[in-house]
Image (tube, rainbow, N blue to C red):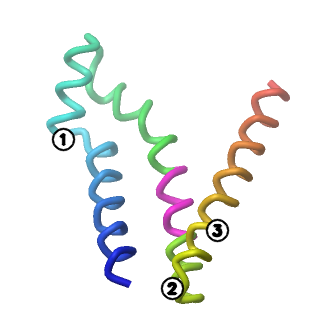
Amino acid sequence: MMLPMLAAGLAGSIFGDHCSPISDTTILSSAGAGSHHIDHVLTQLPYAIIAAVISFLSYIALGLSGSIIVGLLAAFALLVVTILVLKRISVMK
């Protein structure tokens, strides 16, 4: 379970990096694009939250089953369901 534990730590750090308005990469990328850095954070939040929820649920499945394969299958299934739901929502608009 060492590999999933390291992956969870890295996933959390990347989530924090994308959602933090005082992150160096957020400030530099918004400055490079010529936009306000809070606007950049607000555009990144939906993507980061979707990825965090999928990761969280996959880690729950991994923890309950004890199998890395089950965790990966849960992540893949949740990603496919999320894509289909977002596609349906965009078609309805």
**Amino acid at dot 1:** Ser
Dominant SS in magenta: helix
**Amino acid at dot 2:** Gly
Give the x, y percent position of residue 86. 72, 39
- Counting every numbered tag in the picture gives 3
CA neighbours of label 1 inside 10 A, class few (<14), some (14 to 19), many (20+):
some
Tell which of 28 and 65 is nearer to you: 65
Q: Quadrant of the C terminus?
A: top right
Which residues fall within the magenta stretch?
50-57
Tell which of 66 and 12 is nearer to you: 66
Residue identifier under label 3: 74
Q: Which mark is residue 72?
A: none
Q: Quadrant of the N terminus?
A: bottom left
Residue identifier under label 1: 23
Secondary structure under tag 2 reads helix
Q: Quadrant of residue 18?
A: top left
**Amino acid at dot 3:** Ala
Q: Is 31 inside the magenta-drawn segment?
A: no
